[in-house]
Image (tube, grey):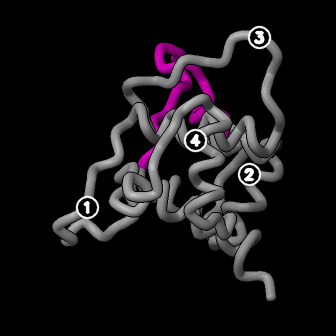
């Protein structure tokens, strides 16, 4: 899944305006401009579109964790230079303080079902024999479920 899509969807799910987005980056110690955010959020066809790098998305997700859960005392985690869907999934799960049952309930909102064992495979270390790569479809369904939970409940 494209980092820009994750950024766009996360912004929409939590109804963040530009200043709130800037604030989330600031929570992770990064200074970004309104123009940078605007360019990351543009559609791919737009000439001003800028690709959101793995490092940039990692900074945003770390900032989201700090904004929603509070900063841990001491040294802040170094943003990853390479992100996988598994890492994005894990960071969103941490930011929202979700347990396995909560994640399964969010996926259920998007009409996507899986077992607790299947889910736990996404959060294992890559070398583990039961590790499973998180495909775009699963991350998309998780984001869709979050959107239903946080945004579409009127």
Q: Residues within 10 Å of mark 4 (few under 14, many from 20)?
A: many
SS at circle 4: helix
> To which residue does mark 4 refer?
25
Q: Mark 4 and mark 1: span between their CA atoms? A: 19 Å
Would you place residue 24 above or below residue 76 in this image? below
Q: Which residue is mark 1?
A: 49
What secondary structure is the magenta-colored segment mainly? loop
From this viewpoint, is residue 95 visible? yes
- At label 1, counting other C-alpha atoms closer than 10 Å, the crowd grade (few under 14, some 14-19, many 20 or more) is some
Q: Residue furthest top?
A: 74
Q: Earlier in the sequence, mark 1 or mark 2?
A: 1
Sequence order check: which comes first, mark 3 or mark 1?
A: 1
Q: Of the residues tagged 1 and 2, which is closer to the observer?
A: 1
Residue located 76% across and 70% down the image: 149
Inspect the magenta stretch and tell me whether residue 128 lies in it: yes
Which residue range is magenta in the image? Answer: 119-135
61 relative to 105, above or below: above
């Amino acid at each position: 899944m494209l980092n820009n899509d994750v950024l766009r969807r996360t912004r929409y799910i939590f109804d963040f305006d530009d200043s709130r987005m800037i604030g989330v980056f600031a929570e992770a110690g990064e200074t970004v401009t309104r123009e940078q955010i605007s360019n990351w959020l543009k559609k791919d066809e737009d000439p001003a579109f800028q690709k959101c790098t793995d490092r940039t998305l990692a900074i945003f997700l770390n900032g989201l964790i700090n904004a929603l859960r509070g900063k841990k005392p001491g040294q802040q985690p170094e943003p990853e230079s390479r992100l996988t869907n598994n890492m994005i999934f894990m960071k969103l799960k941490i930011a929202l303080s979700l347990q396995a049952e909560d994640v399964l309930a969010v996926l259920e909102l998007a009409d996507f079902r899986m077992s607790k064992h299947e889910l736990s495979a996404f959060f294992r270390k890559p070398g583990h024999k039961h590790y499973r790569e998180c495909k775009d479809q699963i991350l998309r369904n998780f984001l869709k479920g979050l959107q239903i939970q946080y945004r579409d409940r009127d």
